[in-house]
Amino acid sequence: MTTLTHLRPAPVIDETARLVTEHYVFPETAEQLADLLRRRLAEGAYDVGDAEKLARLVTADLQSVNGDKHLRLKYHADPVSPEQGAATLESIRRDFDTSLGGAPRVELLHGGVAVVELAPMLFPLDWAAEPLTAALTLAARAQALIVDLRGNRGGDPDTVAFVCSYLLDERTHLNTMYWRSGERTEQSWSLPHVPGARFGGSKPLYVLSSATTFSAAEELTYDLQQLGRATVVGEPTRGGAHPCKGWTVHPHLEATVPTGRAINPVSGTNWEGTGVQPDVPCPAPESLTRAHTLALAQLTT
């Protein structure tokens, strides 16, 4: 627990408000949020000595205007680097090292149906390319494939494109990102070539979703669904379509601020706030069995 002598809320709130004002993808909302934080500070709402409690209070206020789940003051139990983005990288590196690089499960089910679980994140591509290539190449010979994203909380858009490249036959426009910086757009496409073997774009493909599936994992689900490439089985996802960056504002606190928004080339919109809606709704714990049954039926028709 951080004591009052170690935590002065005012500098944390001032810096968080500044970062939101300068970087949040919706400038008008950013001004509202900065005003809200400063007003709440003046009212004494943040007069707490615990960094974890302050993070909860500020996050609730940041998300109170438009419900953006990427907009947070994030608590880290261990002190983190002041370098921009370092707090997030340090925490996810530990997850990478304990999850076989984000591909903890590859299994062949009855009837030639493979399962590849991608969890807990779609890690930065320079880390994840090797384990993902191994997992997806191993599954490439299956008759049908189930990609399990039920426990995936997001990650790197470049890794989304990399995974999609194994599941399509041709180079395909997947997504467009609008960035507040420079008011520019950036397109994401699948790759023309991949290391290893492709599963390809014609065999049955299912994606499992849950209320935990978030951010880049939602993009992977949504991209494949909008292209008509995959059937989504499970629960509506969590609903976060705004990529963000993180800034350390205290040794235990990181402000994460969305700097862009996704625009799908098929739908012209994204999954922000609504989540990706499954094609076959069912409770997440039942979705693997349901998808396996659907795949077997599709293979026999």
Image: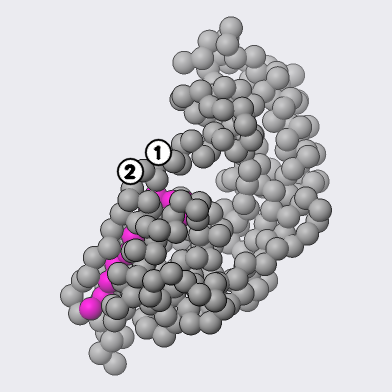
Residue 187: quadrant of the picture: bottom right
Most foreground residue, 86 or 272? 86
The percent coordinates of residue 130 (x first, y second) are 40, 58
Write the residue at 55% across / 60% down.
Answer: 158
Residue 86 versus residue 140 in the image, above or below? above
The crowding category of the residue bearing disc 2, from other C-alpha atoms within 10 Å (few below 14, some 14 to 19, many at least 20), is few
- Which amino acid is tagged 2? Thr
Q: Is the C-beta separation of discs 2 and 1 under 8 Å?
A: yes
Q: Is residue 200 rendered to the left or right of residue 35?
A: left
- Left or right position of 206 against 50: left
| Vertical position of residue 19 compared to residue 211: above or below | above
Label 1: which residue?
A: 94
Residue position for label 2? 98
Quarter occupied by residue 12: top right
Q: Is residue 215 left or right of residue 281?
A: right
Say whether residue 99 is left or right of residue 55. Answer: left
Which amino acid type is shown beneath numbered disc 1? Arg
Q: Is residue 197 magenta?
A: no
Report whether residue 270 is seen. yes
Q: Secondary structure at mark 2?
A: loop
Question: Observer-nearest residue: 114 or 9?
Answer: 114
- Residue shown at the point (73%, 55%) measured from the top left: 179
Query: Where does the C terminus fall, quadrant-wise?
Result: bottom left
User: Which residues fall within the magenta stretch?
Assistant: 112-123
Q: Residue at x 25, y 90 (%)?
A: 300
